[in-house]
């Protein structure tokens, strides 16, 4: 009896060791993530430099982080394979769970790794706010593919850059677009922080334009949208903008269709999601979305990126993957132009003057780190599929 | 005027679903003097139960012909009612009967109800998903059936109102005329005396839960068809239906029906005059006003006497 339980324990521990070995080797193959990533610091004399990534790789919001991480790694791999670098490029990552509280240790990990010369990320605005100062003190550049909070570039973080336009740009351009499309506008927000923020930016611009509009808030916990849908339909509005997330938008789309609303329905980046189409069904047909995000799966210009991504990760690229790809390639572009040893300071200086033509936009920064040209894309649901219409400015 | 008709139709649709759910609260309160806070999860179970069956039947097959639509609607309503009834039966067995046997204080029932509610909601989240906007397959065309003035009445609205009215009619007959109905009323009136008269109290209570659960489950199907289904879908309709039961007079089935319809109508009418953020405020303000003047609800309490 005793013998047998001993055998069991031995077997169990053997399996545990084997499992641990497996997870080690898999993280190793994904570019030396985890604790082992620090080792690459020793080889900086052999002209090996590391690009770090900070974002959520676990927790509720991990999908966004993974979308970006995969693109960063792909860019690093492609740069090495191309063979025109006079140094070797490595990749490392730090998981910040997307939260301000867990961001500082993640940032510390990258800052303390001497081989890291630039960082893509952080993914989220809150996490960025929490660590941008630490990075600035370490003179380490951070290029975010997705932190869109408007105030980030007005706080004097000297090493912060982002390749996406701020939230306010989407609001302004969306307002210009709907003001052009309709005489009477119904603006609805879902009362979330994101929804009210976007609606406020839209409202500000609508006032500037002198457009006729009504604004109303409908809580995102609402399940019955028939009353507000009837109100929109009978208000005679010919354009409706919904500033909120896809879960509310899809229910609202169904109710609007039932209420017989015939006008144009537009929503923002929070609703541009496959889940919107899944939830709204045929009622979501011809809804439009403004989004500062590029979508490689629907944009023909990004086909080679989308294919390479799909091949490497066996999953289609998703939200903010192309932006992360651009951010990484812009950093690599800067590194290529540096004479002699590459240092963190030289990368920051290089980013201030970079002019790199990426997939989503030309990466060229203003003095505060904001991307020079704010591009907002317009998407439309056609035959239950999302398709790219073009940039919003091209539609105005 | 057209607007008024439009909101009235929407209000009746929503109100008849509230009424169905409210009946579950009121029936259980009648026999146990207990608010079954897990009833909102019975409602959710009905939605998911019917979803599984309907999705297997017509998921991904697009729109069906008229005959199939009727069949699927019938199947959905029945499976919704069965899942709701099953959940309610189990709930009574697991969460309430052991407490009753041991003569636990009223507060223990309340805690048990809240615990069961959390458990069921989280279980559904784990078994299905945590998306907020799952929908039924799109198996029928929600077309305009007829118009009153310029206000369109759509197929789904008619389905919901008709189904709810039929169910409520049968429930009313059941409580008034049948032997089971009489025993439910007797237990509500005076449980010890009813027991002396040869009524099996345990059985009656269990059956009351099953009837309330069936109505709640059917409402779950209708509501999911009308809006969406999710593991948290029970909370708001459940709270509103509870308010509706109190509004009509808790313990009184006809009161629950009236309360549900009133609440649905008030909510929708309020949107005519005020931004829709005010909907809940108005609904509960009406509740408070009514209770100020009629503390036991519009039709008064007591299942036994008033019904």
Image: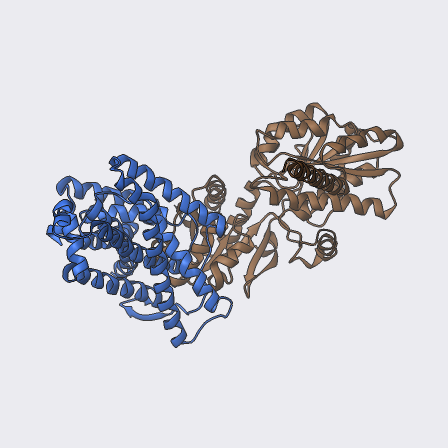
Chain colours: A brown, B blue
Q: Residue B253 location, x and y as percent?
A: 19, 54
Q: Is residue B204 above or below residue A57?
A: below
Spot the residue most to the front. A1
Residue A107 visible, this orientation: yes
Q: Nearer the viewer, residue A211 or B60?
A: B60
Return the residue found at the far top. A137
Quadrant where the C terminus of chain A is found in the figure: bottom right
- Tell me the quarter of the picture where residue A42 sits: top right
Residue A179: x, y in percent?
49, 52
Quick one: A347 or B23, which is closer to the camera? B23
Quarter assignment of residue B156: bottom left
Asked whether the viewer can see residue A220, the reply is no
Residue found at x 13% / y 54%: B307
Task: List x then y, in percent, for residue B201.
Answer: 20, 50
- Taking the spot 37% from the left edge, 43% from the top edge, the residue there is B116
Residue A131 position, x and y percent, is 63, 28
User: What is the quadrant of the N terminus of chain A in the image?
Assistant: top right
Residue at 46%, 71% in the rendered image: B63
Q: How many marks?
A: 0
**Which is nearer the eye, B240 or B275?**
B240
Query: Please, is residue A195 above or below residue A112 in the view?
Result: below
């Amino acid at each position: 009896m005793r013998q047998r339980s001993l055998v069991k324990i031995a077997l169990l521990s053997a399996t545990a060791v084997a499992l641990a070995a497996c997870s080690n080797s898999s993280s190793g193959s994904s570019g030396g993530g985890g604790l082992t990533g620090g080792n690459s610091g020793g080889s900086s004399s052999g002209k090996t430099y590391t690009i770090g990534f900070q974002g959520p790789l676990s927790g509720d919001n991990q999908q966004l982080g993974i979308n970006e991480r995969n693109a960063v790694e792909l860019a690093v791999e492609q740069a090495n394979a191309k063979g025109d670098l006079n140094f070797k490029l490595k990749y490392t990552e730090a998981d910040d769970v997307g939260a301000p509280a867990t961001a500082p240790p993640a940032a510390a990990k990258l800052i303390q790794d001497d081989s890291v010369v630039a960082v893509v990320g952080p993914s989220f605005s809150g996490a960025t706010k929490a660590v941008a100062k630490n990075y600035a003190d370490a003179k380490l550049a951070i290029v975010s593919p997705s932190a869109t909070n408007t105030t980030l570039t007005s706080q004097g973080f000297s090493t912060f850059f982002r390749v996406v336009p701020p939230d306010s740009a989407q609001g302004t351009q969306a307002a210009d677009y709907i003001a052009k499309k309709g005489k009477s506008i119904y603006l609805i927000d879902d009362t979330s922080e994101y929804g009210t923020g976007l609606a406020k930016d839209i409202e500000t611009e609508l006032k500037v334009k002198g457009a006729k509009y009504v604004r109303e808030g409908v809580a995102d916990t609402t399940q019955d949208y028939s009353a507000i849908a009837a109100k929109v339909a009978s208000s005679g509005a010919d354009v409706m903008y919904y500033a909120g997330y896809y879960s509310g938008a899809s229910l609202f789309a169904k109710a609007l269709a039932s209420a017989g609303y015939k006008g144009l329905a537009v929503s923002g980046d929070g609703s541009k999601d496959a889940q919107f189409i899944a939830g709204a069904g045929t009622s979501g047909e011809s809804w439009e979305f403004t989004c500062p995000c590029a979508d490689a799966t629907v944009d023909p210009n990004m086909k080679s990126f989308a294919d390479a991504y799909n091949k490497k990760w066996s999953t289609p690229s998703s939200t903010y993957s192309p932006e992360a790809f651009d951010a990484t390639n812009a950093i690599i572009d800067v590194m290529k132009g540096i004479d002699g040893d590459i240092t963190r300071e030289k990368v920051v200086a290089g980013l201030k003057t970079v002019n790199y033509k990426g997939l989503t936009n030309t990466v060229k920064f203003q003095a505060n780190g904001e991307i020079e040209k704010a591009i907002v894309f317009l998407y439309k649901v056609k035959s239950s599929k999302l398709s790219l219409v073009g940039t919003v400015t091209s539609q105005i | 005027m057209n607007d008024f008709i439009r909101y009235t139709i929407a209000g009746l649709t929503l109100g008849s679903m509230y009424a169905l759910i409210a009946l579950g609260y009121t029936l259980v309160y009648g026999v146990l003097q207990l608010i079954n806070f897990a009833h909102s999860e019975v409602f959710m179970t009905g939605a998911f139960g019917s979803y599984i069956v309907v999705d297997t039947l017509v998921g991904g097959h697009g729109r069906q012909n008229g005959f199939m639509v009727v069949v699927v609607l019938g199947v959905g309503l029945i499976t919704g009612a069965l899942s709701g009834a099953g959940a309610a039966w189990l709930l009574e067995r697991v969460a309430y009967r052991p407490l009753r046997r041991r003569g636990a204080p009223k507060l223990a029932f309340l805690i048990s109800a809240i615990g069961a509610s959390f458990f069921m909601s989280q279980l559904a989240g784990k078994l299905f998903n945590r998306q907020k906007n799952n929908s039924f397959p799109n198996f029928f065309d929600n077309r305009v059936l007829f118009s009153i003035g310029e206000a369109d009445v759509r197929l789904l609205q008619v389905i919901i109102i008709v189904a709810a009215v039929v169910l409520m009619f049968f429930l009313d007959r059941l409580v008034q005329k049948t032997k089971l109905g009489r025993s439910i009323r007797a237990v509500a009136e005076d449980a010890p005396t009813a027991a002396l008269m040869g009524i099996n109290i345990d059985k009656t209570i269990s059956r009351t839960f099953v009837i309330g659960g069936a109505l709640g489950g059917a409402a779950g199907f209708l509501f999911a068809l009308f809006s969406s289904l999710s593991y948290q879908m029970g909370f708001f309709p459940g709270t509103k239906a509870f308010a509706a039961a109190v509004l009509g007079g808790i313990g009184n089935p006809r009161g629950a029906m009236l309360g549900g319809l009133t609440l649905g109508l008030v909510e929708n009418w309020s949107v005519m005059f005020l931004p829709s953020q005010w909907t809940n405020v108005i609904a509960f303000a009406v509740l408070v006003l009514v209770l100020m003047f009629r503390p036991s609800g519009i039709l008064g309490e007591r299942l036994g006497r008033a019904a």
